[in-house]
Amino acid sequence: MAFVAKGRFFAGVAAAILGLAGTAHAAGQCGNNSAGFPEWIQQYKQEAQAQGIGSRGLKALDGVTYASKTINADRNMKSFKYSLDKFMQVRGAQTIISRGKKQKAQNAALFDRIEQRYGVPAGPLLAIWGMETGFGAYLGSQNTLSAVATLAYDCRRPAYFRPHLNAALQLVDNGTLSPDAKGAMHGEIGQTQFLPLNVLKYGADGDGNGRIDMVRSKADALASTANFLRGHGWQPGAGYQPGQPNYAAIQGWNAASVYQQAIAIMGAQIDGQ
């Protein structure tokens, strides 16, 4: 997985993405299997070129394949249908809480800086980090572009994923994302699993080295996650349990209610509440 971006790059690209967000909506009809995927990619490629995607991004489209594993994963997200207790058990909540407390102590200065800048305490960030990748232990093995392109073509949620495909092509075009980059099944990138458009909107330089690396830098991944929550209405000092002001920001992270509740519960225990 290769994802490194200059901090100054994001503002300009984010604006460009807004103009490209509608590009793929005209790119032929969606499909529920691989049969029409190659044709759709070629049509999409022509329209992306017309909208300003450059040679590297366009060439990257030649290498994408229909990601059957991504479709299978998208159709079988069973854990989100569990009860809260079952979900917490399956996700290893007690292990995440225990390891989260250790991570908080070991990286106290980092979490203090993040909270001072974004107003987000360590607990929910560690809960997200632990659930998403086991604190960076496993970032995924699916080709990112193939995953996002497949979901942009698939009939289930094309309107949601097509802007993310546009963003991924911009990242490739600007040399910040390798066409061979690998991540999670839905095209998420890095230690806290950002989709491409969210990297453009909320990517943050948490370690102060002048670039954003969601894969290799836990500081960047965690600062970006805090920036995401702040961008979704997080209020410094307010509570984040259900019914409290910051729970809405957690809801912005994941649409599944059990996931939202798990973040709040684990985060509070990590924070010693």
Image (tube, rainbow, N blue to C red):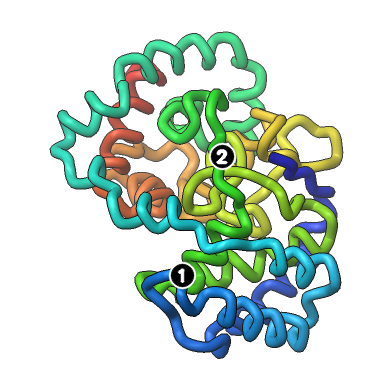
Dot 2, crowdedness within 10 Å: few (<14), some or many (≥20)? few
Is 241 above or below relative to 39?
above
Spot occupied by residue 24 in the image (x, y as percentages of width and height): 58, 81
The CA span between labels 2 and 1 is 20 Å
Say left or right for 116 vs 160.
Answer: right
Q: Residue drawn at (85%, 72%), measured in percent from left and top? A: 55
Assign the N terminus to one quadrant of the image: top right
Residue density around tag 1, few if under 14, some if 14–19, many if 20 or more, within 10 Å: some
Residue type indicated by callout 1: Ser
Q: In this view, does 74 lie to the left or right of 147?
A: left
Give the quadrant of residue 158: bottom left
Q: Where is residue 224 in the image (x, y as percent from the top left)?
A: 62, 43
Residue beneath disc 2: 141
In the picture, measured across the screen, residue 27 lies left or right of residue 267, that is right
The residue sitting at 52% across, 24% down in the picture is 135
Q: Residue at x 45, y 17 (%)?
A: 100
